[in-house]
Amino acid sequence: MSEKKSEHLQGNENKLEGRNSVLEAYRSGRTIDRIYILKDCTDGPVQNILREAKKANSIIDFLSRDKLDRISDYGKHQGVIAIAAAYSYGTVEDMFALAAKRNEPPFLFLLDGVEDPHNLGAVIRTANLAGAHGVIIPKRRAAGLTGIAAKASAGALHYTPVAKVTNLSVTMDELKDRGIWFVCADMNGDMMYGQNLTGPIGLVIGNEGSGVSRLVKEKCDYSAAIPMKGDIDSLNVSVAAGVLAYEIVRQREQK
């Protein structure tokens, strides 16, 4: 599933610059995905921001002034730039609650390092339309709920919970204890039509370039391949997610 990443910080509509704006965002409860701080800056206001960032479990990156200047839109960052989420994140518990409300076995999407926010939004849209109960993404090396992702979801974020977790492998172990089994998209796996994709299930979709990571793949119970009849060997991440999701839907409907 090889694609080029397309998210750029420059012009991000959810970018906050300056110490006061970032600190007020934290104190107002706004969700901050990532914060960039000037390396070796230790004054009081920055330490206050760092404390808020740690409490909020934001990703913290320390950068040189040159790098901060390149990220900045206005050149008035005061050593602090934050990237806010366009939507608040849900929880895994929200997903189980939604499944229980619908009286359905849980159906979850797990995205292993999807980095393009357009792809993230498109997968969330597919998850909603396929009747999935939520989407789980990792904290690091993955797209967050930016404005771009929200727009690509076409409104699905209003209805489909998206949870951000620190460690996808650990989360999968916890979900297995709750009866979830996992199938991952893998062109070297068994053909999807011959697999039983019913019951409580987590569909694992990998990174645009490298696919599902080794550690996450080892946690999966099955690998599913999509038939490829053309001259190239990969599908867009969101398309692959859609094909596999609707095979799950088909099998659930027939059960």
Image: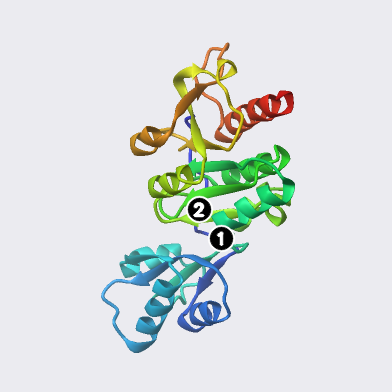
Residue 35: name its quadrant.
Answer: bottom left
Residue 32 visible (yes or no): yes
> Residue 80 location, x and y as percent?
42, 74
Q: Nearer the viewer, residue 149 or 66?
A: 149
> Residue 195 location, x and y as percent?
55, 20
Q: CA distance from mark 1 to mark 2?
A: 8 Å
Quarter of the figure that contains the C terminus: top right
> Residue 16 location, x and y as percent?
53, 72
At x 43%, y 33%, the residue is: 220
Instruction: Report if the CB atoms under discs 1 and 2 are less than 8 Å apart.
Output: yes
Residue type indicated by callout 1: Gly
Residue that carries the numbered disc 1 in the rendered image:
11
Residue 169: name its quadrant.
Answer: top left
Q: For numbered disc 1, what is the local secondary structure?
A: loop
At x 51%, y 23%, the residue is: 224
Q: How many marks?
A: 2
At x 64%, y 40%, the residue is: 105
Relative horizontal placement of residue 52, taking residue 252 as reference (left or right): left
Q: Residue 8: which disc?
A: 2
| Position above or below: 11 against 77 | above
Residue type indicated by callout 2: His
